[in-house]
Amino acid sequence: MKSLRIVSSAMITGAAVFCGMFAPLVFSSVRNAIWEPLFGIGFFTAGFLFHPYSGNRVIGLIGAIAWPLLVCAIIGWGVWKLTASRSPWVAVTAALYFLSLCAWVSVKTANQLSSHAFPFYSQLSAAWY
């Protein structure tokens, strides 16, 4: 049972990371409207807080490495806890998670949302790079 929890945590976290960070590299015409902004918050916050005081290395370290690792740890921990519980919230959380994997928007819509302080990871990482 423990190995099933580990595998499910890894697979769910991996799907979220793919949708939030790597899908824009594979699918150039669409963006995930839930996971990509979640991962983009790291670049957005690092650029807002550290841009006047430090170089791009700190922003890249926080936005491309530290924040995604923190998000992965939180997702993995949450899945670990949910798979151990027998609560009815497990089904609700699973349904919301799978719906979030299906929330794709076009690049044009992502650009419009991003211009209104909705930080998409691909746009912020491209601007940092």
Image (cartoon, grey):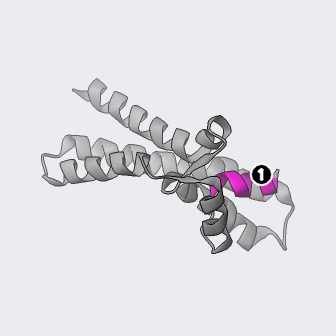
Q: Is residue 76 left or right of residue 112?
A: left
Q: Position of residue 55 (x, y in %)?
A: 87, 61
Q: Is residue 61 left or right of residue 76?
A: right
Residue displayed at 53% across by 58% down: 38
Q: Nearer the viewer, residue 105 or 34?
A: 105
Residue displayed at 77% across by 51% down: 126
Q: Is residue 46 above or below residue 20?
A: below
Q: Position of residue 35 (x, y in %)?
A: 50, 52
Q: Nearer the viewer, residue 101 or 104?
A: 104
Q: Is residue 66 left or right of residue 3?
A: right
Residue displayed at 74% across by 67% down: 47
Residue displayed at 26% across by 28% down: 2
Magenta-highlighted stretch: main secondary structure? Answer: helix
Q: Secondary structure at mark 1?
A: helix
**Label 1 sits on what residue type?**
Ala
Q: Is residue 126 left or right of residue 69?
A: right
Q: Is residue 20 magenta?
A: no
The N terminus lies in which quarter of the figure?
top left
Q: Nearer the viewer, residue 88 or 70?
A: 88
Q: Magenta region: which residues?
A: 120-128
Residue at the spot of label 1: 126
Q: Quadrant of residue 79?
A: top left
Q: Quadrant of residue 9?
A: top left
Q: How many labels were placed on the picture?
A: 1
